[in-house]
Image (spheres, helix red, strand yellow):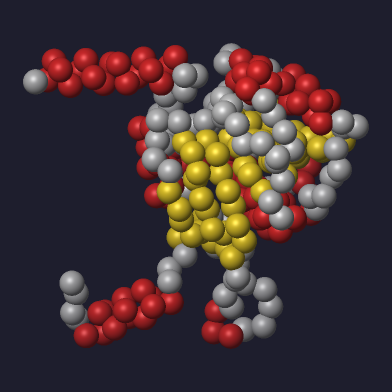
Amino acid sequence: MNATKELIDKLQQDILHWQGFKQQGTASAEAIGLGAIECAFPNGVFPKKAIHEFITVEPEHAAASAGFIAGILKTLLLQGGVCLWISTSRTFFPPSLIAFNVAPEQVIFVDAKAEKEVLWVMEQALKCGGLAAVIAEVKEINIIQSRRLQLAIESSKVTGFLLRNDPQKLGSNTCVARWKITPLPSVLEDELPGVGFPRWQVDLLRVRNGNPGSWKLEWVQDAFRPVVDVVEKEEAVVKLMTGHYA
C-alpha cells in the first residue's frame, strides 16, 4: 500500500515538474500570508517562480487587483531587490504603495509605447534573478507569448504578474493561476470617520493542479485578513457570552 502511495506521489511530482511548477518549501508559502487561499495551490504552496494572471473588466477592478498585488509584493520584497512595473499607460499611483508597506523606491515603473514592447520587456526582466517580481499590464496574450515568459523564469526566482485589463479573449496559456479581484465596500470600526481597510472579493478562477475557490480578504495592520461576516461575528460574540458552542 505504501509503495503504491509513493508511486502516485512520485507521478504527481513529475507531472508538476513537466508543467513548469517548481516545488517550494512550506516556510516560503507561509511567508506570503494569503491564509486559506494558499491551500488551493499544489502542496499548499503559493507558486513564486511562476506567472499569475489577473483578469479585470472595470477600472475599479484593475485598481483593486493592483492593490492586492501590492500586498503580495510586501512579502516578496522582504529579502531586498526591486520590482518592475511595465505598462503603456501608467495609472497606478506610486505613493499608494506605502499603504501596503512597500517603499515606492522599490518599484521601478517602465513606460512602453505598445503592448508588444510590454511583453518583450517583461520577458527580458524575468530573466534577471536580482528582481523580486515583474508586473506587466497587457490586454491580450497568446499561448506562444505565455510560453516565452514561462521559459524566461525557468532559471530565475522571479515571480511574474500579468494584469489584463478588459481582455477580449481568455484562451489557454501557461500561467499557473487566473485571478479575478473585485473591490468590496470597506467598514468603519465603531462608526469612526475616515476610510476603512481595503477589502476584496478574491476569485481564483483557475489554478494548475489546484482547487479554484472564492474568498473575502481585507488588508489590516500590514497583512491580509479574512473578512468576518457581521452575522458570523455577532454569533461568535453570543456564543462567547453564553458559553454555547456548536
Quarter of the image where one finds residue 168: top right
User: Which residue is pictured at 59% across the width and 52% down the height?
Assistant: 181
Q: Residue furthest left?
A: 1
Q: Position of residue 185 (x, y in %)?
A: 60, 70
The quarter of the rendered structure image containing the N terminus is: top left
Whether residue 153 is visible to the viewer of this picture, yes or no, is: no
Quarter of the image where one finds residue 7: top left
Above or below residue 26? Residue 233 is below
Q: Position of residue 216 (x, y in %)?
A: 49, 60
Q: How many marks?
A: 0
Above or below residue 82? Residue 67 is below
Apparent side of residue 55 relative to residue 212 in the rendered image (left or right) = right
Above or below residue 50? Residue 244 is below
Above or below residue 33? Residue 172 is above
Apparent side of residue 168 relative to residue 177 in the rendered image (left or right) = right
Q: Position of residue 81 (x, y in %)?
A: 68, 31
User: Which residue is pictured at 43% across the width and 68% down the height?
Assistant: 228
Q: Position of residue 56 (x, y in %)?
A: 67, 48
User: Which residue is pictured at 45% across the width and 31% down the height?
Assistant: 208
Q: Residue furthest right?
A: 113
Whether residue 42 is visible to the viewer of this picture, yes or no, is: yes
The quarter of the rendered structure image containing the C terminus is: bottom left
User: Which residue is pictured at 62% across the width and 26% down the height?
Assistant: 158
